[in-house]
């Protein structure tokens, strides 16, 4: 009975979010998001798969970008997904505490353009450890593991073990 009540509450939350952001949020009405802070603006869109859930304190900010989260993904406490370009997360992905996924950087060298952007594509069945940071222009293949505290930027094939990686110095 308790589970049915919780699904009902989340159904109402999703309905509220779809009404708050008309045409900007699509996907399954059955989610298990608790304490989510969602902001969508400037034509940004969010597509949610089925039965995604989080522990608490998840921030999702989409500013003119496109965010797609597949089915059955889990975000542990205090995660942040910030999108100005495109972020795609596959099915059955797990994210540890304090994971940051951000598809843009401040362009400190050029005053004409405030941000540098690039897509992030995360495959299916990817596990990301606590305090990891996934940066713009990154592709992580299916069934990969990102170790705790790792900064990730670049292309990684399926079944990669990304541990202690630091991106090369580039802008």
Image (cartoon, rainbow, N blue to C red):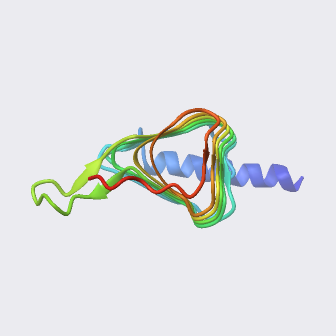
* Front-lying residue, 36 or 68: 68
**Foreground of the two, 24 or 149:** 149
Count of numbered circles on the image: 0
Residue 55 position within the rendered picture, expressed as x and y whole percent measured from the top left: 69, 62
Which residue is depicted at the point 64% across and 57% down? Answer: 129
Query: Who is closer to the viewer here, 165 or 86?
Result: 165
Q: Give how far across and how far down residue 166 sits, in percent.
A: 46, 57
Quarter where residue 49 is shown: top right
Please report the residue visible at 55 percent of the width from the left and 33 percent of the height from the top: 157
Q: Is residue 15 visible?
A: yes
Residue 61 image-quadrant placement: bottom left
Residue 57 visible, this angle: no
Q: Position of residue 128 (x, y in %)?
A: 62, 52
Q: Is residue 81 left or right of residue 116?
A: right
Q: Is residue 113 above or below residue 108?
A: above
Image-based side of 71 in relation to 19, left or right: right
Residue 48 vs residue 133, the one in the foreground? 133
Residue at the farthest right position:
1
Query: Residue drawn at (66%, 45%), measured in percent from left and top?
Result: 73
């Amino acid at each position: 009975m308790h589970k049915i009540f919780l699904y009902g509450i989340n159904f109402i939350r999703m309905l509220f979010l779809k009404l708050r952001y008309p045409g900007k949020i699509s996907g399954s009405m059955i989610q298990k998001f608790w304490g989510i802070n969602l902001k969508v603006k400037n034509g940004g869109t969010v597509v949610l798969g089925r039965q995604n859930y989080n522990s608490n304190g998840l921030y999702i900010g989409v500013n003119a970008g496109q965010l797609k989260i597949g089915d059955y993904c889990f975000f542990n406490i205090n995660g942040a997904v910030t999108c100005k370009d495109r972020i795609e997360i596959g099915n059955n992905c797990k994210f540890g505490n304090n994971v940051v996924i951000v598809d843009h950087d401040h362009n400190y060298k050029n005053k004409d353009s405030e941000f540098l952007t690039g897509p992030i594509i995360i495959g299916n069945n990817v596990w990301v450890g606590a305090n990891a940071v996934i940066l713009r222009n990154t592709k992580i293949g299916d069934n990969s593991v990102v170790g705790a505290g790792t900064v990730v930027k670049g292309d990684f094939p399926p079944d990669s073990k990304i541990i202690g990686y630091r991106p090369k110095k580039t802008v």
